[in-house]
Image (cartoon, rainbow, N blue to C red):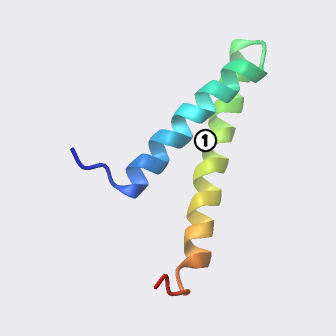
Amino acid sequence: MVIYHFSAMTLFSLLVSVVFATLNKETLREKIFYGIKSFALFMGIAIALGWIMYPFPWH
């Protein structure tokens, strides 16, 4: 099974967001909002950093 970088990043972001939301918030509403916000921030920052690093050669 091949897992691509974007899929791995999405899965990691989702799992970490769920764990963070479960551990940090009290009510179900707070957990859902925090999880969605955390997931969006993980993905947004990762994509932004990818675009920032895009012009620089890696070898």
**Residue lying at 67% horizontally and 19% vertically, measured from the top left:** 22
Tally of numbered tags: 1
The extreme front residue here reads 59
**Residue lying at 69% horizontally and 29% vertically, measured from the top left:** 33
Relative image position of residue 2 (x, y in whole percent): 24, 49
Q: Which residue is mark 1?
A: 39
* Vertical relation: 6 (above or below) 19: below
**Residue lying at 59% horizontally and 27% vertically, measured from the top left:** 18
Residue type at mark 1? Phe
Relative image position of residue 24 (x, y in whole percent): 77, 23
The quarter holding residue 51 reads: bottom right
Is 57 on the left or on the right of 4, as rendered?
right
Mark 1, other Cα within 10 Å: few <14 / some 14–19 / many ≥20: many
Task: Determine the secondary structure under disc 1.
Answer: helix
**Residue lying at 68% horizontally and 28% vertically, measured from the top left:** 20
* Vertical relation: 38 (above or below) 46: above
The quarter holding residue 1 reads: top left
* Vertical relation: 28 (above or below) 15: above
Relative image position of residue 48 (x, y in whole percent): 62, 67
